């Protein structure tokens, strides 16, 4: 596939997707720290702090990298192989400047240096969703790639649409959203949602595209919990 700016390939999708970027001479690309698997010797790498000091400090509390790597091609260009940290799919989104994208804080894979990324505090929306308190707001112009655990399904929204909070990967910022509980807000439902992980959904309104993942990593963690080592007294 070729976009207006960057030639790329996505291989081994959707279970173990990897991204291959063909950088043109003197072209650069921003990549999530530790996601580089291999690269042409014509590329050089430098590391920078992501999003400014305060935003980086905020990301410290969600357990994500404070840094981002920039790969720069020499006068002959070269290939860059990128592998996200969890097994799943990689998707591409081309920004034209007319709308932006909201992405789960762990979803960033790579982007053009002309793309602006900003962390957005969700407040109580993030608390009740059980997810991290930060979303990445992506805007500007250029190419952006994001990933998830499991396959990614694109859903066109026109009106209202409801998604379990643990399955949300990304959505266009033309959509409004609000986290709520199935069956309404009550002490019983609140207790069930927080302790049992059920009943918490995000209601989207408006017109735009939404991306959800086919699996929830919290379901995998709950499945593995009985098998974890325990200390004997």
Image (spheres, rainbow, N blue to C red):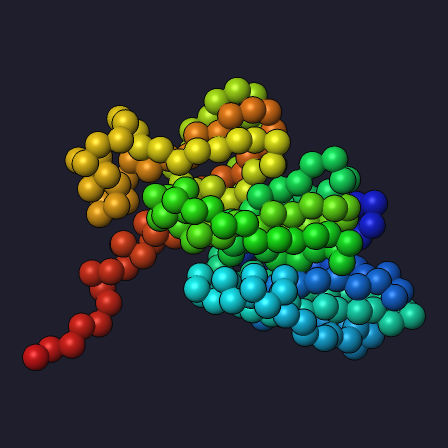
Total labels drawn: 0
* Location of residue 142 in the rendering, given as x and y in whole percent from the top left corner: 77, 48
Q: Is residue 27 left or right of residue 193?
A: right
* Location of residue 207 in the rendering, given as x and y in whole percent from the top left corner: 59, 25
Q: Residue at x 83, y 50 (%)?
A: 5
Q: Residue at x 27, y 54 (%)?
A: 222
The answer to which of 204 and 83 lies nearer the viewer is: 204
Q: Which quadrant would residue 42 be assigned to in this image?
A: bottom right
Q: Residue furthest left?
A: 233
Quadrant of the image for the C terminus?
Answer: bottom left
* Residue 13 in view: no
Judge whether 53 appears above or below 125 on screen: below
* Residue 71 in view: yes
Q: Residue at x 70, y 62 (%)?
A: 30
The answer to which of 184 and 35 lies nearer the viewer is: 184
Q: Is residue 81 left or right of residue 232?
A: right
Q: Residue at x 20, y 42 (%)?
A: 191
Q: Is residue 218 left or right of residue 113?
A: left
Q: Residue furthest front?
A: 54
């Amino acid at each position: 596939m070729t976009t207006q700016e960057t030639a790329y390939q996505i291989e081994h999708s959707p279970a173990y997707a990897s991204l291959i970027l063909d950088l043109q001479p003197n072209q650069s690309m921003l990549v999530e720290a530790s996601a580089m698997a291999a690269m042409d010797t014509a590329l050089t790498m430098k590391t920078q702090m992501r999003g400014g000091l305060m935003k980086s400090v905020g990301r410290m509390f969600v357990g994500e990298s404070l840094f981002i790597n920039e790969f720069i091609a020499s006068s002959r260009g070269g290939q860059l192989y990128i592998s996200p940290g969890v097994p799943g799919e990689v998707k591409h989104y081309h920004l034209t400047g007319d709308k932006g994208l909201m992405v789960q804080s762990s979803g960033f894979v790579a982007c053009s240096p002309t793309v602006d990324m900003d962390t957005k505090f969700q407040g109580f929306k993030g608390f009740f969703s059980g997810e991290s308190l930060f979303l990445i707001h992506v805007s500007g112009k250029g190419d952006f790639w994001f990933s998830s655990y499991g396959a990614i399904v694109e859903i066109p929204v026109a009106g209202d649409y409801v998604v379990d909070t643990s399955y949300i990967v990304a959505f266009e910022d033309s959509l409004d959203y609000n986290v709520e509980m199935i069956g309404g807000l009550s002490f019983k439902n609140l207790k069930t949602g927080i302790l049992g992980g059920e009943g918490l959904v995000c209601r989207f309104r408006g017109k735009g595209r939404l991306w959800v993942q086919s699996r929830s990593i919290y379901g995998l963690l709950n499945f593995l919990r009985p098998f974890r080592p325990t200390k004997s007294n």
